[in-house]
Image (tube, rainbow, N blue to C red):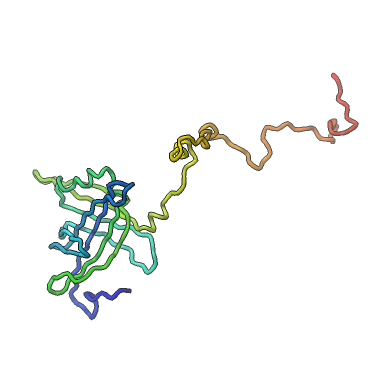
């Protein structure tokens, strides 16, 4: 476990802030084509590892994160309030690309003079959903954006791999593949695999007075 000097040695006053870095992929086929947004709950610009985090103060709210020594699944929320209509367009104009974006949450600590000291990663995951709400006061519109993020473990557990057994999925990579063309024709048909057919012709047995056609002495009677 890391030793955090800001909270060690009986510190009575702990000054910290949350730092959020959002990496949005503009083109899924090119992982290098990204847009990065950074913001924090601090009240001045803070540079961490060469990245400048814009101050939002109390307008930024970060939900709790699961703390465990092992890799565990967990979700968190990030809320940005008091956003103007012009600044919210990066969410609305993203064409849904905000889902799947990489999000990293750090907690930074400051010394007694309010100078940034160090930070530690608290959460790393992927945005899975978002919501936007509007609050109008007079002629002013204030928006609140809430994004939900899931840890990598949660995303991997919910991942669906492979292809579906239908014509469209099978022809996604090869338009001439006809392996699943008949799936719709047999869909809903019940097959009694491993059982005798239900509509079968029963051959009379040898007992009970019925003639047995498999008996060598059997002779079919004429009408």
Q: Determine the residue positioned at 16% across, 64% down.
A: 46
Residue occupying image coordinates x 15% and y 52%: 82
The answer to whether 171 appears left or right of 100 in the picture is: right
Q: Quadrant of residue 67?
A: bottom left
Residue 149: give x, y in percent of width and height: 31, 55
How many discs appear? 0
Q: Residue at x 16, y 48 (%)?
A: 87
In percent of width and height, residue 83 lies at 16, 50
Residue found farthest to the right: 217
Q: Which residue is outermost to the left?
A: 139
Tell whether 177 sits left or right of 19. right
Q: Residue furthest top?
A: 223
Residue 157 % position (x, y): 42, 55
Q: Quadrant of the N terminus?
A: bottom left
* Figure quadrant of residue 216: top right
- In front: 74, or 119? 119
Q: Nearer the viewer, residue 67 or 53?
A: 53
Q: Is residue 77 above or below residue 135?
A: below
Residue visible at 22% across and 62% down in the picture: 19
């Amino acid at each position: 476990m890391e030793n955090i000097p800001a909270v060690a040695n009986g510190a009575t006053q702990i000054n910290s802030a949350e730092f959020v870095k959002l990496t949005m992929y503009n083109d899924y086929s090119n992982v290098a084509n990204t847009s990065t947004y950074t913001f924090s709950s601090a009240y001045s610009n803070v540079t961490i590892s060469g990245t400048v985090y814009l101050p939002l103060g109390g307008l930024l709210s970060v939900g709790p994160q699961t703390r465990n020594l092992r890799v565990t699944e967990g979700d968190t929320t990030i809320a940005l309030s008091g956003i103007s209509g012009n600044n919210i367009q990066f969410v609305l104009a993203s064409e849904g690309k905000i889902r799947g974006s990489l999000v990293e949450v750090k907690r930074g600590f400051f010394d007694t003079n309010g100078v940034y000291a160090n930070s530690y990663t608290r959460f790393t995951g992927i945005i899975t959903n978002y919501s936007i709400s509007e609050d109008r006061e007079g002629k002013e519109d204030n928006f609140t954006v809430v994004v939900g993020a899931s840890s990598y473990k949660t995303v991997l557990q919910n991942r669906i791999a492979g292809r579906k057994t239908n014509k469209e999925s099978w022809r996604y990579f090869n338009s001439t593949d006809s392996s699943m063309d008949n799936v719709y024709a047999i869909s809903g048909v019940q097959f009694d695999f491993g059982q005798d057919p239900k509509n079968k012709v029963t051959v009379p047995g040898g007992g009970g007075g019925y003639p047995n056609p498999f008996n060598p002495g059997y002779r079919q009677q004429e009408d």
